[in-house]
Structure formats: C-alpha cells, structure tokens
Amino acid sequence: MIDKMDFSFKNNNTPYKGTLLLSDPFEMDVHFTRSVILICNHDEEGTFGFVLNNYIDLSAKELNEELENYTGRVSIGGPVDKTNLYYIHAFGPEIDGSEHITGDLYFGGSFEGIIERLKADPANESKVRFFIGYSGWSGEQLTEELTQNSWIVVTNHSLQQIMDTHSDTLWKALMAQQGTKFRLLADFPLNPENN
C-alpha cells in the first residue's frame, strides 16, 4: 500500500504578538494572496497586524517628505485605514509611545523620534518599516479563519526577515521553513492550471 502525504494547509500553532500568518497557497484575495502578516496584537477583542510582502510603487518620500533618506520599500499593511502611515521598529522603548510587540520589535510611537534616528544614521533604516493601512480581525474572526485553514501561524522566523523590505520571496522562504509538505506547497503554482 502506498502512503499518502497530507497536504492539508494547517499547523497547531496559535497566534500571539510577534507571530506571523502565512496565507493559504491558493488564496486569491487581492489583499492576501501569498501574504505574510506580522501579528502586532492579539486578544479577545481582536487582532491586528501588517502585511509584510505587499509593496506599493511609491517611495516613502512621496508619502511623507520627512522620509527623504529612507530607501526601503513601503508595504500595504492591509485593507483597513489606508489613509495613514504606520510603522514598526527595532529602536526599543527609546521611541516615546512605542508599543512592545516581541523581543526588539515595537509598533508606533513618536514619528519625530523615528525621523531623528533615520537622519542621525543611515544604517538605522534597517530598524524601521513603513505601512499604508493594516490588517484587522474582530473578536474570534481570526480563530474562525484558522479553523478554515486560511492561514498557518509561524513562530520560527527572525527579526531580519520581518524588517527586510528588499525580499520578494518572504512567503516562499517562510513556507519552506515549516517542513516538507509546506516546502512542496510553496512550489505549487498560484494557479495549478498553469503547471
């Protein structure tokens, strides 16, 4: 008898601040096709985070002139509130008003403090990422989507992977890190008819 490989898109990880969501390989939603989302907050009221790998064609300077020296790409963080510029950073609590996500990773805080650090040292660019909009789920909505296998929760990632705005293969790389079946799913064409 031939053993069958389980290709179901699920794992047993649960979401919490600092984890990543990887979308189902065949999800065709305009906002979430092969997306990677950083979870910034997750509690009984809901969840919010940012899509890390959906970039816009505008420079940061075109969005805000104070970001004239920032050369990283800006991501569409999600479909909610796309009129605001959001950011995550690794400057720690030295940015007033920052909210801790996990480890050295923080959300928000003083925009002026971010600008000061970017102007003081160009190398600080690798410590901040910008987003237009965010992704959000109310109450148990994300839990429901996880039971429908729309996402898997990833815990084995690095700060460097989160902060890298130059990679176009983040979803595939993270899928491959999850083991054999996920590595195989990562190589499936987006439309299986194109195989």
Image (cartoon, helix red, strand yellow):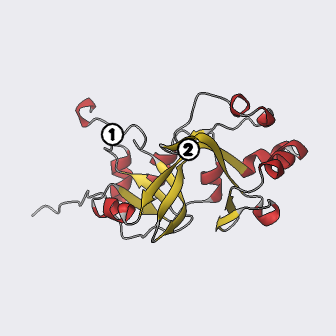
Task: Specify the quadrant that holds the C terminus.
Answer: top left
Q: Residue at x 47, y 43 (%)?
A: 79
- Residue 177 placement (x, y as % from top left): 47, 58
Q: Residue at x 76, y 37 (%)?
A: 70
| Foreground of the two, 104 or 168 | 104
Instruction: Tell me the distance, in whole angstroms, between the alpha carbons under discs 2 and 1.
Output: 19 Å
Q: Residue at x 17, y 63 (%)?
A: 3
| Residue type for callout 2 | Gly
Relative placement, left or right, of 155 versus 114 is: left
Q: How many marks?
A: 2
Relative placement, left or right, of 71 versus 37 is: right
Camera-near label (2 vs 1) is 2
Vertical position of residue 142 compared to residue 168: above or below: below
Vertical position of residue 53 compared to residue 159: above or below: above
Vertical position of residue 191 compared to residue 14: above or below: above
Q: Are there few (<14), some (14-19), or many (20+) residues within 10 Å of tag 2?
A: many
Residue at image mark 2: 133
Q: Residue at x 83, y 52 (%)?
A: 113
| Foreground of the two, 71 or 68 | 68
Q: Earlier in the sequence, mark 2 or mark 1?
A: 1
Task: Specify the quadrant that holds the N terminus.
Answer: bottom left
Please tell me whether mark 2 sits on a helix, a strand or a loop.
Answer: strand
- Residue 175 placement (x, y as % from top left): 43, 53
Residue 176 seen anywhere in this rendered image of the structure: no
Residue at image mark 1: 28
Q: Quadrant of residue 192?
A: top left
Q: Are there few (<14), some (14-19), or many (20+) residues within 10 Å of tag 1?
A: few
- Residue 156 placement (x, y as % from top left): 52, 64
